[in-house]
Image (tube, grey):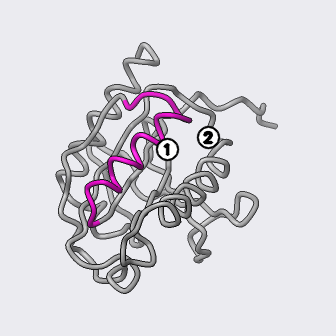
Amino acid sequence: MGEAQFHKPVLLITAAFSRHHDALAWGRARAERDWGPVALESETFAFEETSFYEATMGSGLKKVLWAFERLVSPTQLVDFKLLANDWEDEFRRSHEHAELRPLNLDPGYLTEAKLVLATTKDRDHRLYLDRGIFAEVTLHYHRRVWQARPWTYPDYQRPDYHSFFDRCREYLRARYGS
């Protein structure tokens, strides 16, 4: 029989996208207020791989990824996702933008071996966590590179995203002392 062990702390990652610069800045400030300083920030990417969000968010979307300084327990992912959903609603109510959803915040976490994203949508490859939140392993680290799964979103298959996740992985390893 295997012995149960606690998981090492993980690196909290959040993807933010919007067509409005003020929304991205607000999202970062709001996240840093509750989750602490951002340790690493990606470049701002053009989010053009899908038109899925255009009906609620408009066109010309930009996406940025943040990795937070404070390491967290992976068991907190549900709380992070629910809070991010609340922030999206708070921004929508407090700012006058034409879109139904002017800001999208998607938290997840990174370990040395994988990137896990939280979602409210159930699919065959997602595991239910709690309170209406599911999780999926979006990328896994194998043979020194990030590998996609059949369900990995197209933007997460991009080499520039992988470069950012490489930086995050090195940051996490340095924090572990490995």
At horizontal 59% and vertical 54% (from top left) the residue drawn is 81
Indicate whether residue 78 is drawn in magenta. no
**Number of numbered discs:** 2
Residue 42, given in percent of the width and then of the height, sits at: 24, 43
Circle 2 SS class = helix
Residue 124, given in percent of the width and then of the height, sits at: 59, 76
Q: Is residue 81 above or below residue 104?
A: above
At horizontal 37% and vertical 55% (from top left) the residue drawn is 16
Amino acid at circle 2: Pro
Circle 1 SS class = strand
Q: Is residue 40 above or below residue 25?
A: above
Residue 128, given in percent of the width and then of the height, sits at: 69, 64
How far apart are the two marked residues, 2 and 1, measured between alpha carbons? 7 Å
Work out whether residue 34 or residue 43 is closer to the camera in this orientation and state it.
34
Query: What is the number of the mark on residue 109?
Result: 1
At horizontal 19% and vertical 57% (from top left) the residue drawn is 45
Badge 2: few (under 14), some or many (20 or more) residues near its Cα, within 10 Å? some
Residue 28, given in percent of the width and then of the height, sits at: 39, 43
Q: Residues at badges 2 and 1 in contact (C-beta under 8 Å)?
A: yes
Farthest residue, direction top: 177
> Quadrant of residue 104 in the image?
bottom left
Give the magenta part as a residue range: 19-38
Query: What is the number of the mark on residue 74?
Result: 2
Q: Is residue 168 above or below residue 136?
A: above
Amino acid at circle 1: Tyr
Work out whether residue 133 or residue 29 is closer to the camera in this orientation and state it.
29
Farthest residue, direction right: 1
Work out whether residue 98 or residue 53 is closer to the camera in this orientation and state it.
98
